[in-house]
Amino acid sequence: MITHIVGARPQFIKLLPLYRALAAKGVEQKVLHSGQHWEPAMSEVFFADFGLQADHILDWSTDMASNQSNMEQVLAQWRPQTVVVYGDTYSTLCGARAASSLSLNLAHVEAGLRSFNSNMPEEACRVETDHLADWHFAPSETAMQHLRAEGLDRGAGQTINTGDIMADGLMAMPDVKPDARSILVTLHRNTNVDDKAMRESILSTIHDLASPDKEGYQVVWPLHPRLRNAIGKDPSVDYPHIQWLPPLSHADMIQAIQRAEVVLTDSGGVQKEAYFLKRHCVVLRTETEWKELLASGCSTLLPPMTEDFYYPMRAAVKARCESLFPPIYGDGKAAEHMANALVHEEGLVRPRTLTLAHANPSPLHHHVSRLFHVITGWRLDWSETGMTWSNSGQLDVALEDASWMQCVDEGPTPFVAGSAPDYLASILWAALRREEWGSESLDEHGRYQAVHSVMAQRGWLSTAICHRWAGALMQDHQLVGHRQVMAQPTVIIDVDHLRAFDGYPLSHRLLTLWRDLLKGKWTRLYARLLQDIDPFDAHDHLAMLQLSYPSIRWQAFAWVGPERNDHDHGLPGDRPLAKDALRLLHRIMPSMGIHPSYHGTDVMAESALLAQSLGHLPLRQRRHYLKMRLPDAYEDLPHGMAYQDWSMSYANSPGYRSGMGLPYPWLRQDGTLGHVVVPSVAMDQHVKGRDAASIARWLHALEADAMASGHPLVIASHWRFFGPNPAWADADCLPYLEWVKGLKQWMKERA
């Protein structure tokens, strides 16, 4: 039996085609309604429209733990083999957690979507759900790339580009001529509705568009309960030129979109419905997870403003899609592809699973299961009747125990059972970097030194050794090891020296020019005075590289600490020109993270500075000079799978510091999950002084090894090396001219 968990209007729409596709295969199904958005106008009308009924409706609570517990009680009674969750609401996350808690198989419809906006609760919901899911049904190739890059590819038949399930049926609908000068509006997101100033700005601006004294558009607006409650009265009193409607059934909403020339919305589902029905859509958000719609030109992103919003909105409404609505979300058979993945002729499909023997698995057993899942794509379950394995007993010992530092002197793994390798304890030891905990083997910058590492001494740094150990365990159990479908290589850019000259006040610039004159830095003076160039400005170069090599993924980390010292290069984040520069870079690299300053002891405070430019707290961090002490440094970071740390490599030597080549969740000392760790293997300074050809060969070799272990290559570089002419910037940059040439040669040869 399969259980579907839903709780909001878009999920009902996604449920119907999959429910019908599974019913055609004779699958027993039940629908559990979370109660999140339950009211007759929003839920009953849709179920009646579709000819479905929820088998059970829960009472929704503001406490997520209560919602999860209530779902667990129902699922424990029904005992479905598989649970299907949809989208990215709190209902999605609670359903995913409930299924995971009961060890039920989990499928996620619309997997892999990312907005990179920490202000959106949906982002945390969708990321954690993807971590828990056994099947990922991705709506696009972009979503697939996100899953691969985050180490969430479960392999063929389980992580699938099915296309968008909302396209099923809509793509086959005939074209309908819209009503002239007509606009359909929907609004429900907390950022637009709960903030009074923002809400009234949007309402008054759209009302002005409808006013006969101004644009005179015909504006139709189905009123969402959240917006109705926020307004607190009949909206037609203050906004009489708008045609207000009660919530519409799905069929009526489709007709309303067809009748409109333009759709104004903050809904992800309505964005796609407008696209499938070939209507230009203006998205009232600062970003969208449906980035393909923006790239196609069929949607326009319009960040709401609390004032002076009329002219930007008028311009966006008058714009039109110049393309022919290209097919970017599959063939209109998404539900069929999903049903085929979940059901074979023999019955319901089980995800690839290895079950090992253990009567009472600890949090360490469950965490190494997560690591194994990341590496191989196979679930690792525990049962008294599971298969025997080489168990040293180390996973039954608390992480704080000193025995975790007592590795064997020889052999293929740090822990053994008798003479047999204990691969699982070894994987956990390496991934949690247990040998570094509380170590005093630090250099003058507070960095743990590779020379003291057991991983380095035993030769385990040169490859993602945890992947080798996981593969050996699978061979022991005669299983075919799955290797991840390759994600794009990633180049990290540490944004140092941002607007390092013209971003400062005139007095500072004059002093800098005087210093350059005294030191004879003629090329830098020439660039700044005669060519009006900031030698550190790499925007144009990096934008060109992104366009030229689309198979490379770029990830920026901005240095925006409130103070500077000799180790901090660039501009404090509170400078106006720095904010403008960061906003520009954010448009190029929307997943920008924080690179804390050298002294940065409060990462979140410095993140707040960057948030002033981005509009939201960054979800990714990369510690300056890798200055951190484990495990304390990770205890202070925010919880949640949406948060990532990219600090993983040694400053003076390449290698896989944690033995992992794929992003993986961190286990906190209290046994709960923390953030996600993203390993990187090499930095520009590792090849300082080498020529371009040897650097290109080195990068090819690193990538070949990464592919053999089933993970993408992640390397790091610095912003200032990509300026208009690094030789103008600083003598420090000269040794890295060959690095940039070698990097570009590698990218060109692999293109």
Image (tube, grey):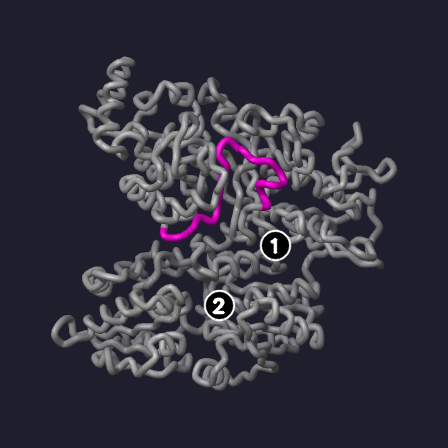
Residue ID for mark 1: 156
Identify which residue, 508 or 725, lies in the foreground: 508
The answer to whether any part of residue 20 appears in the image is: no
Q: Nearer the viewer, residue 431 or 118?
A: 118
Is residue 66 left or right of 727 when viewed as pictured? right
Q: Secondary structure at mark 1?
A: loop
Q: Is residue 623 magenta?
A: yes
Q: Is residue 539 above or below residue 608?
A: above
**Looking at the picture, how far across and down is residue 59, in whole percent?**
57, 79
On the image, the x and y values in percent for residue 699 come to 51, 29
Region in magenta: 615-635
Name the residue rendered at 52%, 40% in the picture: 646
Residue that lies at the very extreme toward the left in this rendered image: 213
Label 2 packing within 10 angstroms: few (<14), some (14-19), many (20+): many
Circle on res. 208: none
Circle 1 crowding by C-alpha within 10 Å: few under 14, some 14–19, many from 20: few
Q: Which mark is residue 165?
A: 2
- Report the amino acid beneath label 2: Ile
Where residue 115 appears, as percent x and y from the top left, is 43, 55
Q: How far across and how far down the image is residue 84, in percent? A: 59, 68
Q: Is residue 537 visible?
A: yes
Q: Is residue 597 magenta?
A: no
Q: Nearer the viewer, mark 2 or mark 1?
A: 2
* Three-letter amino acid code of the residue under disc 1: Ala
Of marks 2 and 1, which one's residue comes earlier in the chain?
1
For the N terminus, the image quarter is: bottom right
Direction right: furthest residue: 418
Residue at horizontal 22%, vertical 28%?
Answer: 507
Q: Is residue 294 above or below residue 519?
A: below
Q: Residue at x 83, y 42 (%)?
A: 392
The number of numbered discs placed on residues in the rendered structure image is 2
